[in-house]
């Protein structure tokens, strides 16, 4: 196997679709993106081919120089067959065989994987997981997703549902309703959308509350950014909610530490965008939920790829599944 190989990566998002041409040593040779809000696959798929060909040509390469492509995709999806079955953020994309389409058009091999797993692989090859044999990556944004690598192997599960840590139930009695339909999921307490909906419900009849004022006087605009501002302003309710988020995160982190004994827990968006204000309260509660040994052996760090994740995620999947590489 060549020391340095060229791969393409696609990252399918609800509003944007990222395309990255990368080398296996971590260099982005070219990048582009396509607006993907309320689109139709018959309009977008040909653009994916065109953009890929342009990136390859602009890098002074031929498509035959590219060893393969990876697709980082949201659920629900048919992972085994590379089909976007029903992505929640785009109602027009139903049962789209994106992998086979791109393979046929580009005439190179492709692979398809859950976006959280791709993000974990990206951090492993190019970011905060480098040199680590056992780690857990958490997406921590609108929802809570996870990618787990143990003994240099990505945990996928029998039906490719491995790593759905956001839907571990952490409150069995009268738990909050989660978007997945269950009650008491980790995501229902710490996912950005769930937290926002919870606060909006609490304050729907309190237009003068400081949190609502931080949202421009509109309850429906309350989100994690608004909550962070209110916490930094020492609003009492915001601080109480922040403490519960920290407690619930610690509960989930402790489960992961005691189950997988990872060397690193890598945090996505909230970890790097908010920083210590977010992570320090979690660390305060962790001794209640993790053994001293597993806690001492695990570093809690933030993503290194951050906003560039979309350009690396699909490429990392290609490196793992098509090239057989390990970090």
Image (cartoon, rainbow, N blue to C red):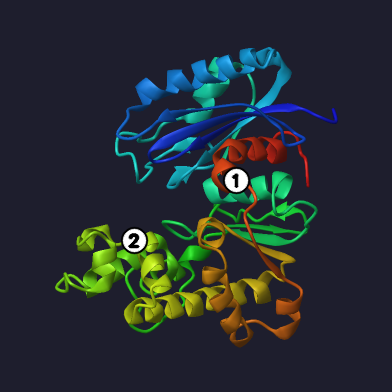
The label nearer to you, 2 versus 1, is 2
Label 1, residues with CA under 10 Å away: few <14, some 14-19, many ≥20? many
Q: Is residue 181 visible?
A: no
Give the residue at mark 2: 223
Q: Looking at this rendering, what residue extends furthest in the front direction?
A: 233
Q: Are marks 2 and 1 in contact (CB under 8 Å)?
A: no
Give x and y (percent) for residue 200: 25, 67
Residue 61 sits in quarter: top right
In the rendered view, tell whether residue 235 sits above or below residue 73: below
Residue 264, label in figure: none
Q: Where is residue 53 in the image (x, y as percent from the top left)?
A: 57, 15
Classify mark 2: helix, strand or loop: loop
Residue 318, how many percent across, how many down? 66, 35
Q: Residue at 59% across / 19% down in the picture?
A: 55
User: Residue at left 76%, top 81%?
Assistant: 293
Which disc is residue 118 wearing? Answer: 1
Q: How crowded is mark 2: few (under 14 residues within 10 Å), some or many (20 or more)?
A: many
First-in-chain label (2 vs 1): 1
Query: Could you tell whether 264 is left or right of 95 in the image?
Result: right
For the question of whether residue 195 can be seen, the reply is yes
Which quadrant of the rendered structure holds the N terminus? top right
**Residue at 52 percent of width and 57 percent of height:** 273
Which one is in front, 311 or 211?
211
Q: In this view, does 309 lie above or below 247?
A: above
- Report the residue that reaches farthest toward the bottom: 288
């Amino acid at each position: 196997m060549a020391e340095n190989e060229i791969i393409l990566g696609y990252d399918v998002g609800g509003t944007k679709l990222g395309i990255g041409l990368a080398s296996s040593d971590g260099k982005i040779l070219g990048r582009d993106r396509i607006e993907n809000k309320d689109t139709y696959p018959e309009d977008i798929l040909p653009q994916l081919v065109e953009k890929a060909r342009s990136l390859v040509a602009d890098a002074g390469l031929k498509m035959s120089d590219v060893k393969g492509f990876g697709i980082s995709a949201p659920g629900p999806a048919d992972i085994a067959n590379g089909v976007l079955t029903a992505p929640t953020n785009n109602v027009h994309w139903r049962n789209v065989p994106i992998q086979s389409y791109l393979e046929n058009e580009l005439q190179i091999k492709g692979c398809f994987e859950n976006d959280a797993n791709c993000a974990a692989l990206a951090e492993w090859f190019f970011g905060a997981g480098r040199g680590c044999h056992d780690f857990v990556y958490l997406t921590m944004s609108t929802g809570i997703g996870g990618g787990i690598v143990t003994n240099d192997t990505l945990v996928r599960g029998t039906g490719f549902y491995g790593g759905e840590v956001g839907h571990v139930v952490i409150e069995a009695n009268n738990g909050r309703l989660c978007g997945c339909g269950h009650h008491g999921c980790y995501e229902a307490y710490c996912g950005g959308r769930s937290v926002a909906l919870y606060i909006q419900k609490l304050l729907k009849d309190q237009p003068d509350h400081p949190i609502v004022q931080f949202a421009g006087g509109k309850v429906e605009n309350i989100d994690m950014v608004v909550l962070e501002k209110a916490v930094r302003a020492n609003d009492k309710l915001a601080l109480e909610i922040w403490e519960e988020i920290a407690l619930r995160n610690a509960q989930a982190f402790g489960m992961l530490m005691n189950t997988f004994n990872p060397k690193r827990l890598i945090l996505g968006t909230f970890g790097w965008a908010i920083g210590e204000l977010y992570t320090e309260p979690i660390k305060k509660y962790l001794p209640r939920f993790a053994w001293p040994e597993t806690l001492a052996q695990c570093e809690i760090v933030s993503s290194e790829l951050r906003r560039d994740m979309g350009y690396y995620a699909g490429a990392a999947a290609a490196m793992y599944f098509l090239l057989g590489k390990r970090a």
